Amino acid sequence: MISIVLIGTGNVARHLLDTFRLYQEIRVVQVLGRNEKNLAYFREFSKTSSDFEKLLPADLYIIAVSDDAIPSVSQLIRNKNGIVVHTSGSVSLDVLSKYDHRGVFYPLQTFSKERKIDFKNVPICLESNQREDMELLKTLAHHISEQVYEISFQQRRSLHLAAVFVNNFTNHLYQIGNRICEENKVSFDILEPLILETAHKIKDLSPHDAQTGPAKRGDKRTIKQHMEVLGNSGYRKIYELLSQSIEREYSEWIENPYLPDRGIEKK
Ligand SMILES: NC(=O)c1ccc[n+]([C@@H]2O[C@H](COP(=O)([O-])OP(=O)(O)OC[C@H]3O[C@@H](n4cnc5c(N)ncnc54)[C@H](OP(=O)(O)O)[C@@H]3O)[C@@H](O)[C@H]2O)c1
């Protein structure tokens, strides 16, 4: 049995609790949060407290709070023997340096409270300063996921940076697309099959091979037309920057369309 105290009441804490409670081998003995109101959801499944002095003993303390709050919140865990980990993709293990037993338990997925996630498909990236602590983290991670990776801080940070591009920025581009549709009174739903196919096709093609569109083809007239429609809005700058980046990626091919495609087959 692995006993856990969860610290934080946000998206990640909620998803971790919902997952851990499915396994007999894992017990969330307490959830700590600064805000009593936000602890309400957790009360049904675990003891809760907003008083960090009342921290219970556990094998593992998982700090799932905003990145910037990890250093100050970690200072509140006193006189405990368990391993202290955080769940961030971009915060170093060193912020927990006052603990002999420290680590990182980073689930690489986008979590929103409103969406259920099957943790079996969530890659979990682990780091620890002690071999035996890594073994416990791996045991826990293997209970809930089929994808467990022991990776360095530099690798985790790079994955998080890449994730910002492929997830956060992509979603922001959905928002822009949605707004353009609203302004022109056409349903955003019509774009849904395109959005889904864009995501699904990278299972078979590399991102390089999967690219289509005016910037890849070098269709300058279409690009000019789109820029005119966008006028002086901030979206125009985004369109221009992304188009230039795509053009650079394919410049050789645009200048000489008869070159064989230099893309690398994914499978
Ligand atoms: N969401 C994701 O997709 C995702 C994925 C992987 C990893 N992560 C990482 O997981 C961690 C938590 O992310 P999240 O999405 O769960 O964040 P979130 O939903 O915004 O929740 C943040 C939590 O941090 C607490 N908090 C913030 N400042 C605090 C402070 N000074 N003292 C005590 N508690 C404080 C908040 O408390 P209040 O509710 O009282 O404000 C809240 O419980 C972050 O390190 C993030 O990088 C997130």
Image: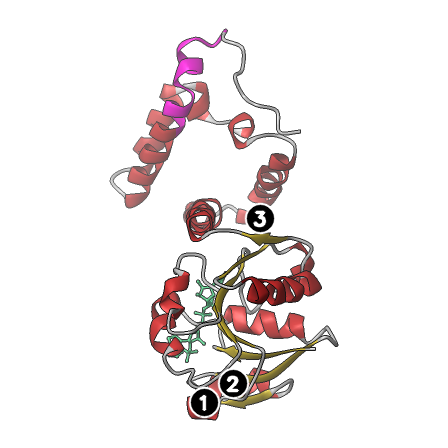
Mark 3 residue type: Asp
- The percent coordinates of residue 263 (x first, y second) are 54, 21
Q: Point out the tag, 2 or 3, that comes first from the N-terminus.
A: 2
Q: Secondary structure at mark 2?
A: helix
Question: In the image, which disc is placed on residue 50?
Answer: 1
Q: Quadrant of the N terminus?
A: bottom right
Q: Is residue 152 above or below residue 237?
A: below
Find disc 2 in the rendering and name its residue: 39
The Cα atoms of the two marked residues, 1 and 3, are separated by 43 Å
User: Does residue 116 show up magenta in the picture?
Assistant: no
In this view, the residue in front, 30 or 80, is 80
Q: Point out the tag, 2 or 1, that comes first from the N-terminus.
A: 2
Among the 4 quarters of the image, the one containing residue 119: bottom right
Q: Residues within 10 Å of mark 2 (few under 14, many from 20)?
A: many
Mark 1 residue type: Ser
* Circle 2/circle 1 CB separation < 8 Å: yes
Q: Residue at 62% of width from left, 38% of height from top?
A: 197
Q: Secondary structure at mark 3?
A: helix
Q: Residue at 54% of width from left, 10% of height from top?
A: 260
**Mark nearer the viewer, 2 or 3:** 2
- The percent coordinates of residue 215 (x first, y second) are 41, 25
Asked if residue 118 shows in the view, the reply is no
Find disc 3 in the rendering and name its residue: 189
**Mark nearer the viewer, 1 or 3:** 1
Q: From the viewer's perspective, is 38 left or right of 41?
A: left
Image: magenta residue range:
246-258
Asked if residue 20 shows in the view, the reply is yes
In this view, the residue in front, 150 or 110, is 150
Q: Is residue 52 above or below residue 83?
A: below
- The percent coordinates of residue 204 (x first, y second) are 65, 32
Q: Residues within 10 Å of mark 3 (few under 14, many from 20)?
A: few
